[in-house]
Amino acid sequence: MPVDFLIIGKTGWIGPKLAALVESRGLTYEYAEFRMENRGAVLEALDRLQPKHVLNAAGITGRPNVDWCETHRPETIRANVTGTLNLLDCCAIKGIHVTNFATGCIYHYDEGDFKPTREGGRAFTESDPPNFTGSFYSKTKAMVQELIIEFPNVLHLRLRMPVSDDLHHRNLITKITGYEKVVNIPNSMSILTELLPVAVDMSLRDLTGMYNFCNPGAICHNEVLDLYREFIDPEFKYQNFSLEEQEKVISAPRSNCELDASKLIKANPGAEINDIQLAMRKVFERMKINLGK
């Protein structure tokens, strides 16, 4: 019997969250057991499971961070370029809709129009070409995006700095609370509790095209850490450093940008997608409850 969803990313962070959402709606799913670059295995699984929709939450970001990709370039290409394109092509041949979870870390503020909106600049839209290839990870994502958007069966969702209600090690909050110092620059962020249900809805509606998949607005690391101190650890302390100082302790530069979420909001008028300042406060309200259980 055909399944409603085939989910790629069983051992990742987002894949199991998607599975729980799908199951909560009474829909069926199977996890993919193949490697995306293995064309024969992908086609066999599609024929055997006959999924109505595919959710691709797989890919390499690097462990413990994207610096890993600088020294593991073939592996990064194999997953983020070759594997992704192979999966989407196989699904296109079979006429299957794919929701592809990607990244918006392919942009960076500049000295022109693309300054933080709180400084009078404008946010990046889906039609703006990537302007950041400072890391090999971002370079692969920017390159493959140009090809992904040519597939008519793909919904391409660009997340930024994902945040969850727990202290999972992939959660941005967990990452920055463990840093000795942080940069204080406004950035778009994706609150998974609000956005992942929207992704499932968009998939079920067979929407296609590219969307900035983040909450509206931007928030600084300092603002996030102040909320952490308010809700979770009153004794927590942190320090700032500049981008120039940061570059001395990392292998590759990092993306800092604000994405325009207007297209996403317009496509989902009934969804609860709060401004990032409110959404982040709600995260910590839920986190405090979760940690107290």
Image (cartoon, rainbow, N blue to C red):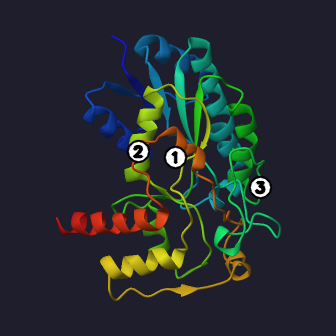
Tell me if I can see residue 11 in this picture: no
Please say if the residues under marks 2 and 1 sit with CB atoms less than 8 Å apart.
yes
What amino acid type should be assigned to the residue bearing mark 2?
A: Ala
Q: Residue furthest left?
A: 293
Report x, y in % for residue 18: 38, 39
Q: Residue at x 37, y 52 (%)?
A: 193
Relative to the observer, which residue lies in front, 120 or 19? 120
Relative to the observer, which residue lies in front, 275 or 60? 275
Q: Which residue is mark 1?
A: 265
Please say if the residues under marks 3 and 1 sit with CB atoms less than 8 Å apart.
no
Q: Quadrant of residue 200?
A: top left
Report x, y in % for residue 39: 60, 20
Q: Earlier in the sequence, mark 2 or mark 1?
A: 1
Q: Residue at x 49, y 77 (%)?
A: 223
Report x, y in % for residue 77: 69, 41
Mark 3–mark 1 distance (CA, rounded to whole Å)? 28 Å
Please say if the residues under marks 2 and 3 sit with CB atoms less than 8 Å apart.
no
Report x, y in % for residue 53: 46, 23
The image shows residue 127, relative to residue 88, as above or below, that is below
For the N terminus, the quadrant is: top left
Q: Which residue is mark 3?
A: 133
Tell me the element at label 1. helix
Q: Residue furthest right?
A: 112
Mark 2–mark 1 distance (CA, rounded to whole Å)? 8 Å
What amino acid type should be assigned to the residue bearing mark 3?
A: Thr
Tell me the element at label 2. loop
Disc 3: CA contacts within 10 A as few (<14), some (14-19) or many (>=20)? many
- Which mark is nearer the camera, 3 or 1? 1
Tell me if I can see residue 245 in this picture: yes
Could you say which disc has been placed on residue 271 in the image? 2
Q: Earlier in the sequence, mark 2 or mark 3?
A: 3
What amino acid type should be assigned to the residue bearing mark 1?
A: Ile
